[in-house]
Image (cartoon, rainbow, N blue to C red):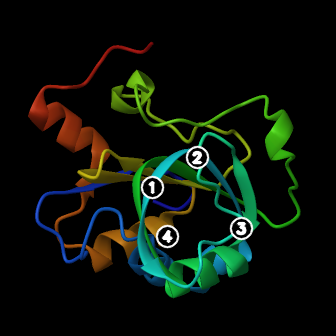
Amino acid sequence: MAGTALNMILRGKSQLPYYTDLAYIFGVLGYRAQTLNWLITDAEYNWLGGESFPPEFRLDSSTPVWISGTRLQQILQECAIQFNWGVLSGFDPDIVLDPTHLVIYPYADGNRALWTEAAAIQHPQALIEIVCWDNTLTLFLSKDPDLSRNFQAAFSEAMDLDLYKQAQGILRSGE
C-alpha cells in the first residue's frame, strides 16, 4: 500500500459535532497537518463563534487563503468555523504559492471530477486535499497512506471513495 493514494468519504452519522469540524479533523491528522502550508479555496463558511473573526479568513470567501498549518490549527482551535463548502489543499512547507495568481483553483461546488473513478487531488503539488461538501460530507484525498489510515481509523464511518461511488451508482465517466 505504500506510495498509493487512498481517498476516503465521511458522511452520515458522525462523531463530528457538525460537518465539517476541521478542528477535529486536523486533530486526527496530528502534527503532520501543522507542518504543511494550506491553500483554502472555494470556501463558504459559517462563523459559529469563538475568538474574533480571523483576518486570514475573509467574509468574501471567494478570495483564496494561503496559510501555515500552525496558524490554521490555531484558528481552528480558537474559533468555531463550519465549512459549508471548500477545498483545503496541503503542501510541503518548501512550496510557496501566491493565492492571488493561481493557475489551478481547486473547487468543490459543481466539481464533477470528484465523482469520477479517477478522482485525484486537484493541485498537482498538493499532498492532501480535504473537500467540504455542502455540510453533508467530507472527502479526504491523500498521497500519504499513513494520513489516510489515520483518517479511516479515527472515523469508523469513513469509507473508500471509489467503493462509495460504485455502491451509490454515481461513478461518472472521466470528464
Q: Distance between the residues labelled 3 and 1?
A: 14 Å
Horizontal side, residue 121 vs residue 14: left or right: right
Residue identified by numbered label 4: 147
Q: Which residue is drawn at 69% across and 46% down?
A: 64
Q: What element carries label 4?
A: helix
Judge depth for marks 4 and 2 and give the one in front.
2
Can you say whether 79 is above or below 100 in the image? below
Residue identified by numbered label 1: 45
Tell me the kind of residue under disc 4.
Leu
Q: Earlier in the sequence, mark 3 or mark 1?
A: 1
Report x, y in % for residue 47: 44, 66
Q: What element carries label 1?
A: strand
Q: Would you say residue 32 is visible in this rendering?
A: no
Q: Can you tell which quarter of the image residue 164 is in?
A: top left
Horizontal side, residue 57 vs residue 129: left or right: right
Mark 2 closeness class: few <14, some 14–19, many ≥20 residues within 10 Å? some
Image marks 3 and 2: residues in contact by CB distance under 8 Å: no
Residue 61, disc: 2
Q: Residue at x 53, y 62 (%)?
A: 2
Considering the image in quadrants, where does the N terminus appear? bottom left
Judge depth for marks 1 and 4 and give the one in front.
1
Report x, y in % for residue 171: 25, 24
Q: Earlier in the sequence, mark 4 or mark 2?
A: 2
167 or 11: nearer the viewer: 11
99 or 172: nearer the viewer: 99
Tell me the kind of residue under disc 1.
Tyr
Can you say whether 47 is above or below 95 in the image? below
Tell me the kind of residue under disc 3.
Pro
* Numbered circles on residues, count: 4
Q: Earlier in the sequence, mark 3 or mark 2?
A: 3
Q: How far apart are marks 1 and 2 (CA)?
A: 8 Å
Residue identified by numbered label 3: 55
